Image (cartoon, coloured by chain):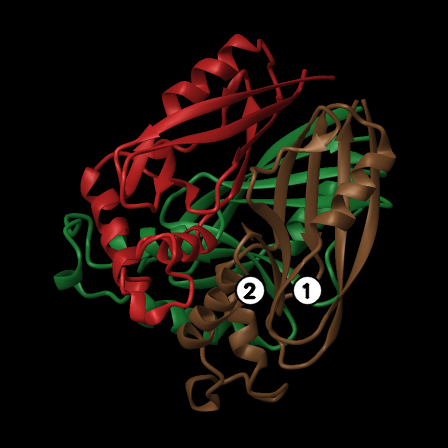
Chain colours: A brown, B red, C green
């Protein structure tokens, strides 16, 4: 049994979902492990991780719209407003989605379903650079 | 340290929670590991995983009602409607719950609390067959 | 490769977020592992886990307020009311957050971002004692 880890830096253009399945798959392949467990961990509290459909791009747009309505940019709703009206809604949207994801690796590939993609979900108003730690353990 | 994996196929009768704690426990027992880490991963984006109370069945019904209200079947709310009015709400409900779960295995048993059950949360309108990958690593 | 596990008992004073990053970091340090994977698992269905900002305490208050509005203490909304008006909203809030968290350990430390803290999210009305299983696997 061995392990490996790295940190991906994902650039996001503002609020919404940025797919990085390809970067993950490429790193997995370079580790030459047949079977194992992949963990993804985002080192931020105003961005999150999500596995979602990567077929119709409208799914990502509708997800973004849903979270905008559920936790709107409206400073009158929040105490924490010093970092901008987008910051507290960002924390809420992050709390409702994932900080960590675990995906089995089988036959040297992440065991995603046919339509599943791995996304960085940006919740802040402006472009950001986000760190996602990847950790792989297996044989 | 060793590892094992399998794929469970869970039949769901339509929207709501289907418990499969028993299937998981049975597979764990067959692996003869005393201590380790179990990962569950659902290979779909319109169904999800949830650990919830398995004592009063009304808890599952109330959970279902809550998600029906939060992300209703109402095509006027969504762009992605080509796969039916239930598909986009299904993606949203999946985003709000879990694609992966990690549970320690201690003394050859999953370390669930007294009232915790493992559920497949179906979000599509009709009966489905859902794949859940189980991965176990330990001794 | 080796593994270790323990159970932390976290006292909560009622609804809201209780940080226990320090307890986790202390236990990690005592295991003398340089690299590995930490799993946290809460053995309850009316409390949950969350990684959130630990800089401005208003973030935690706003998170609590958000979940109070989203799943209110209002018995008219729920079937499951026998355990009190706070119990079903507690299950819903737990379903929307995390039962398990996975965090890579790198250079003998959990790989949290600068502002990330690990929280027990209490959803019941009164003080509780909550069990969180920690499992560490690595070298």
Q: Which residue is mark 1?
A: A44
Can the viewer see residue B91 in this picture? Answer: yes
Of all chains, the one bearing label 1 is A
Q: Verify CB contact (< 8 Å) between mark 2 and mark 1.
A: yes
Residue in front for this viewpoint, A125 or C28? A125
Residue A63: x, y in percent? 48, 64
Residue in front for this viewpoint, B41 or C60? B41
Residue A49: x, y in percent? 61, 56
The residue at the point 55 percent across, 44 percent down is: A115
The tag on residue B98 is: none
Residue in front for this viewpoint, A117 or B110? A117
The residue at the point 33 percent across, 68 percent down is: C70
Residue C41: x, y in percent? 53, 40
Can the viewer see residue B20 in this picture? Answer: no
Secondary element at image label 2: helix
Residue in front for this viewpoint, A103 or B107? A103
The residue at the point 70 percent across, 49 percent down is: A21
The image quadrant where one finds the C terminus of chain A is top right
Instruction: Decide: few, some or many residues near mark 2? Use Cα within 10 Å; few <14, some 14-19, many ≥20.
Output: many
Of all chains, the one bearing label 2 is A
Instruction: Decide: few, some or many residues near mark 1? Use Cα within 10 Å; few <14, some 14-19, many ≥20.
Output: many
Q: Is residue B27 above or below residue A117?
A: above
Along the horizontal axis of the image, is B132 left or right of A6?
left
The tag on residue A94 is: 2
Along the horizontal axis of the image, is B42 left or right of B89?
right
């Amino acid at each position: 049994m061995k392990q490996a880890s790295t940190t991906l830096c994902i650039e996001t253009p503002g609020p919404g979902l940025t797919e990085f399945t390809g970067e993950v798959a490429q790193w997995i392949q370079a580790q030459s492990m047949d079977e194992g467990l992949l963990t993804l961990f985002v080192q931020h509290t105003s961005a999150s991780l999500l596995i979602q459909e990567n077929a119709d791009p409208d799914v990502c747009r509708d997800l973004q719209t849903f979270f905008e309505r559920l936790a709107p940019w409206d400073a009158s709703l929040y105490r924490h407003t010093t970092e901008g009206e987008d910051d507290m809604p960002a924390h809420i949207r992050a709390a409702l989605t994932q900080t960590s994801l675990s995906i089995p690796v089988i036959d040297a590939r992440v065991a995603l379903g046919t339509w599943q993609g791995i996304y960085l979900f940006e919740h802040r108003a402006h472009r950001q650079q986000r760190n996602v730690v990847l950790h792989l353990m297996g044989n």
